Amino acid sequence: MNSQISDLKFFLSPRSIAIIGASENFASISGKPLHFLIEHDYKGRVFPVNPKYDTLGGLKCYKSVLEIPEPVDLALLAVNFRYVLPALKQCVEKKVKFATIFASGFAESGEEGKEKKKQMAELAEKSGMRICGPNCQGSVSLKERVIGGFSASLGVKPLNSGPIGYVTQSGALGYSIFSLAQEAGVGFSYVASTGNEVDLHTLDFMEYMLENADTKMIISYLEGIKNGKQFIRIADRALELGKPIVALKACRSEIGQKAACSHTASLTGSDAVCDAFFRQKGIIRVNDIENMIDIAALMQRIPALPQGKGVGLITTSGGAGILMADEATDMKLTIPEMDPESRKAIMEVIPPYGSALNPVDVTAQVINEAEDFMKVLQIMVKNPEIHALVIVVTQITGESGRRMAEDIVKISRLTTKPITVAWTTGDKLVGDNLKILSDGGIQYFKSPVRAVRAMGALMKYTDFRKRTLAANTGFIEKDAIKTRESAISFLTDKEKSLTEHQGKELLALYSIPVTKEEIADSEEKAVGIASAIGYPVAVKIDSPDILHKTEAGGLKLNIKNTSELIPAYREVLKNARSYNSKARINGVLVQQMISGGTEVIVGINNDAQFGPVVMFGLGGIFVEILKDVSLRIAPVTIEEAIEMIKEIKGFKVLAGARGRAKADIMAIADVLVNVSRLAVELEDKIAELDINPLLVLPEGQGVYVADALAIKQ
Amino acid sequence: MNSQISDLKFFLSPRSIAIIGASENFASISGKPLHFLIEHDYKGRVFPVNPKYDTLGGLKCYKSVLEIPEPVDLALLAVNFRYVLPALKQCVEKKVKFATIFASGFAESGEEGKEKKKQMAELAEKSGMRICGPNCQGSVSLKERVIGGFSASLGVKPLNSGPIGYVTQSGALGYSIFSLAQEAGVGFSYVASTGNEVDLHTLDFMEYMLENADTKMIISYLEGIKNGKQFIRIADRALELGKPIVALKACRSEIGQKAACSHTASLTGSDAVCDAFFRQKGIIRVNDIENMIDIAALMQRIPALPQGKGVGLITTSGGAGILMADEATDMKLTIPEMDPESRKAIMEVIPPYGSALNPVDVTAQVINEAEDFMKVLQIMVKNPEIHALVIVVTQITGESGRRMAEDIVKISRLTTKPITVAWTTGDKLVGDNLKILSDGGIQYFKSPVRAVRAMGALMKYTDFRKRTLAANTGFIEKDAIKTRESAISFLTDKEKSLTEHQGKELLALYSIPVTKEEIADSEEKAVGIASAIGYPVAVKIDSPDILHKTEAGGLKLNIKNTSELIPAYREVLKNARSYNSKARINGVLVQQMISGGTEVIVGINNDAQFGPVVMFGLGGIFVEILKDVSLRIAPVTIEEAIEMIKEIKGFKVLAGARGRAKADIMAIADVLVNVSRLAVELEDKIAELDINPLLVLPEGQGVYVADALAIKQ
């Protein structure tokens, strides 16, 4: 655990808690935390603070936090927002380690609130006392029974402790999710509600929980990402540890973003970049609370993560098998067909109108013979291509249902392959069968689609993780400093952007192939350069003041010989001068023409949260009309680059559709990797870079940057 | 009600039922129907038939159906599949009106089963006795307590009767859905399980239920569509009546389709065509049982369908509001912003950190003042742009929660705008509040996303229905017979396909603009035609034996004058002869060249289930690589045609992206309408037709068929 993150220990596991503004009304926000701490038998010291009382809940009540005779790890501020700052200052004086502020009315409401929020942030910064909130509902350590919040859901007894860590930016929705998850059997290690995040934020808690041995998965409700780089670090570490992060990331829509602004006064950032980040780091994104709870519930109950994305589907009803197959296909899981021998063995124990493919339809008849269902389970579990089982039981009731439930529990004890069940029967009919499953550690659902969706999320996670860990990650960094130094020499002048030629020199430093070209300051030199490069060539005006060369008439393509070159040279100069008479002109760029390539676009943008982001797309209508682009946070590994290329809808154009030559995909991937290296090393220097087009030749023949525009920071 | 469909009355509402193979074991498939009919107090006559017993369940038991002294409307065959045919024959002799066969083992299992299935179908055909099944779980009329099935879910008392009709091709999954829906409070009018559908099928029941006054919505589980034309008729009628049809249509995936084949031995047809059909007719497609049950439950409890797709979102938690806004945006609902006056009125009753936009975040504080929440509800309901409300209540418990629930019920009584609630709290906390909602007729959910998804489905339905009914549907049919007669004259020869020129003549008959062109059989004639048309022209070989003119070198484009025309004429003839020396050559087509148009593709295909289907897409990579096409069942109205055009991803190309001229979209729509008319009128003559390309000029300048290929039936 690194030192930067270990210091949340006494927030989540405080030895002593002061409740400032504690009240005798245990139904109120200011009364509940004391009530809950007592009720749930918190083992540390509790100090109610309120000048109105001498004792509260059988404990001595203090007039002020300063009167408390012992050290205080955590102060819960249950006071109105007007009293928050004075109380905080006393906490600092008392050397309280952490303070949680419940009150709302800061960032959300005008200038006064904003000012107070700023003061709180400064207080935290200067004093070293870390602050959580305001406008949060408090945090909880289930195992240590630190119930430091006021949500009604914390009044339920017992609260389930377990392996799921949970961070939420929303208090009310956040604890609703907690409540529904608890009733679905999900046990939590820690819950952190962070509200307006003046100091501590969701990612801080996520990072801490990740290193906690009791926590096997982190689920989260997020609106905005406060620190993209920290999230990258967390995501990498989570992948290393094999602890999945599930993100219910809201604000996909414009109206959603506007609503988030209005209630947390925070910018939510680009959802497209965030989505790309999730994909790049194997973070499981969900769009509803149910899906998140389903995944957590399943994670908690399986013996190990599924080891791949081959799913075995078993059903007592053909229809349910089809629904599962449809969903598994949508999720891009694999549904391996059973081998002939297994098929034969299965057909021996199921009726002839069943099916031994996958989905395996055992039919309702399988219930008639005690051993048959177990045999099918054994065969499926043994199949090395199957990494998890999803079983649908329709209306099998009574003794037969009980036997099936028991068989499922039994097989689950003989394998580490995860198993889940959709038992699609109303509660009145299903009897104790669900209890048998539940007691046996099997997570069940009522919908076949939900069962596949939850298991599928975990299967895809492991599949992604395996591929990522197996991949040769990281780019070659040995020359980084030297390259950066050379690069910076291009970037020292006062111009806002680089000329095309400078841009290409910069790209060439990062081993990105560019067209052969040179600047000519006379017709003779132009002729000389052209014949050295070889015809055909292009000529382009080279001026820091003319960025849009086509618009200025400063560009002539496909010049086949000297007699075409001279007039072209003169024309671009003339056009440039009449376009902008004050333009400083460095000369005329004489450039190699590459023919027969496919045009693609590679770009860099600096995202406010995640830093440099690499973009890839096909030229022309694909990017312009279809917005068919893929994004990744830099740096990009070669494997990620290949995925980026394959991810776009128009990939078939590069893959050799309709008898075209297959494009040099590896060469594009190299460019993406190298551009991402440039983006990282020059993050403070380059604001934006567009290679448009990058010409891609057939496989083995490489790529060339035909034009590039770089804008400085 | 038309005579064709009225005759299911005595199937769903029989006056007397014989149970052939009835058993004294009330837990068995053969015992349950008798048990259920008695238990649920069926009012008609019941005749158990089984030579083993004298009485069963207190009723006289008959040796054979022939011994029953009274007429029998419905026979339930609860016998093994070997005895089905003899029993059916006796039923025919007894003049039984309907027979339901439970036994499985026919279509699913080999030649013997297939043969028996065929015999059953023939028996139904010849005798007029209609057969349901085999391999079905029986049908139910809830209101009349005809519990003619053996599913365990029918043993629950009481069964909820209500306005939802339900047809299912899957027995086991089908009655699972029934069971879950019943527990969710969904009341059914009729349930029909159709199994292998040797005679009566899902659509027959759908059609019957549609005309039933007690049925307001039909939900369905479908794998394959038996009669597309019947489904079209049903869908049109349903739209006319305003009764939504919800389809859980499985077999979206290849593996799903394979599984369906293996368990029902039926072909599932093209899912893409089926999906287009659903879109065209306003059928609500769902992919999971939960979504279907949610929609039915909501439909049952709202006073009227929402009158548009403007949704009002109210929440006690900002986060939940965002989740709703995200989902509503995904569904393409509108989320009208509240007008300034309403905003002001709302801000007066909610805290300053709430939001009076839409979503309206009343915050948890709204619970402190008794009247405030009601005021917000009133303002929202009054807004004419809002057609339905979705309200999220997070963890508001106790007295405050009760008051909110009561307010919601109260406001629902003052408006016909539908209202639903997501109360996102665990059961242990929510207390009686959900019961208050439920007793007050309000459907609630636990997930904000599910609530929006269910309401949104109904909102989109009404929006679609209004637009469709308002549209000037139907194409001009007055000349149909005449046009068909003229068209058929082209189609009488023995060739498998039409030449380009014939194809265009056919299209022209249907008022579809084609390029000016004529066949020349000499160079002189070619010159004459070209000068009459005006240069530039194209020349193309015209031969019934050369369909791929480019491949044969039988095509020259962009001929600018006579001196280019003569050699081109000669070359295409020469090339054609050397490509296929036996080809019959009609001459050389001299054709107008249209320049500057955008290429689109229009096609007709005959779908095995739905008949002629019209396809539209942009030329080039859009269709070839991105498969970016839209489909509609013919005939296509002008409004549907416009939707088809707008639906493709590349629509911006036509709409005038990046300074292009806007294309003549209305002219394309006309072509789609006219092509669909041709498709319908010549369904028995034309198997396939491809207009590729149709050249689209800028707005107001029309379109031209540049090439066409028609293949005959």
Image (cartoon, coloured by chain):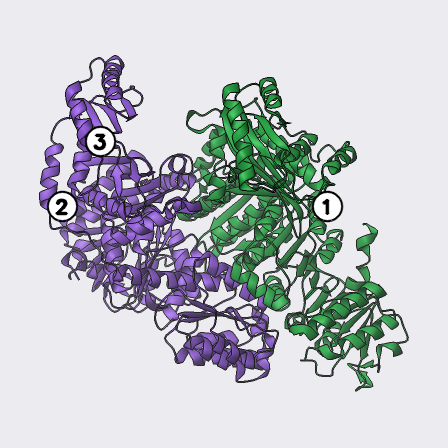
Chain colours: A purple, B green
Q: Secondary structure at mark 3?
A: loop
Q: CA distance from mark 3 to mark 1?
A: 62 Å
Please, which chain is the residue tagged with disc 1 on? B
Point out residue B661 in the picture as x, y percentages from the top left corner.
48, 24
The residue at the point 55 percent across, 46 percent down is B456
Q: Is residue B559 left or right of residue A600?
A: right
Say which mark, if any, is on residue A126.
Answer: 2
Res A497 seen here: no
The residue at the point 52 percent across, 46 percent down is B390
Foreground pick, A284 / A296? A284
Residue furthest out toward the right: B69
Say which mark, if any, is on residue B684.
Answer: 1
Dot 3 alpha-carbon crowd within 10 angstroms: few under 14, some 14 to 19, many 20 or more: some
Q: Is residue A239 left or right of residue A316?
A: left
Foreground pick, B293 / B671? B671
Res A315 seen here: yes
Please, which chain is the residue tagged with disc 3 on? A
Foreground pick, B410 / A626? A626
Q: Which residue is mark 3?
A: A534
N-terminal of the two: label 3 or label 2? 2
Kindly indicate the quadrant of the structure image that contains residue B591.
top right
